[in-house]
Image (cartoon, rainbow, N blue to C red):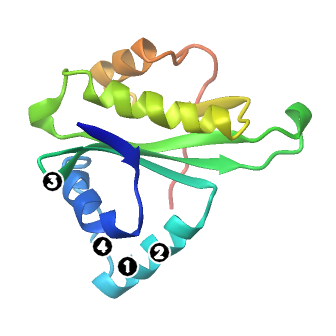
Amino acid sequence: MEIRELGPDDLEALLEVYEHLHREDDPLPPREELDALWQTICADAAQIYMGAFGVGRIVAACNAAVIPNLTRGARPYAVIENVVTNPDLRRTGLGSTVLQHLLSRCWDAGCYKVMLLSAAERGAAHAFYVRNGFDKDAKQGFVIRK
């Protein structure tokens, strides 16, 4: 199993594993827009996309945005999103491995904290995050959508 940061040639494989992320999701824009967006993401050093590869495809992935900050000694913080593992490979330690690689990159970027949100009803996911070092009681999350 190869764990590495994703790059310009990994969009198709990433979109395939993202099919396991949400049962229902907004439709994607046309492929040329996705390609342009992915190139922008790949060129942005503040965007970290990590993936685990098996049998020529991405089988687990997650990403973080490193955000500049004027507090905490001007150290940045990071927000993790889109943590997903192929359902056939869940509970094998693969998701933890990818997440730990992503956390290492965030710490290397000087982040003083890394945070994420998880749907309130996803108890198994919450246990996964706690096993990976996240403190579920440290903060209260709030979401507003449009």
According to the picture, the residue beneath numbered tag 4 turns out to be: 28
Q: Looking at the image, do the residues carrying marks 1 and 2 touch, with CB atoms under 8 Å apart?
A: yes
Q: Is residue 37 left or right of residue 18?
A: right
Of mark 3 and mark 2, the one earlier in the sequence is 2
Marks 1, 3: nearer the viewer: 3
Residue 103 to residue 129: above or below: below
Crowd band around label 3 with a 10 angstrom C-alpha radius: few (<14), some (14–19), many (20+): few
Q: Position of residue 29 (x, y in %)?
A: 33, 79
Residue shown at 57% from the left, 38% from the top? 105
Q: Is residue 82 left or right of residue 70?
A: left
According to the picture, the residue beneath numbered tag 3 turns out to be: 56
Q: Looking at the image, do the residues carrying marks 2 and 4 touch, with CB atoms under 8 Å apart?
A: no
Crowd band around label 1 with a 10 angstrom C-alpha radius: few (<14), some (14–19), many (20+): some
Marks 3, 4: nearer the viewer: 3
- Quote the CA–CA distance across marks 1 and 2: 6 Å
SS at circle 3:
loop
According to the picture, the residue beneath numbered tag 2 turns out to be: 39
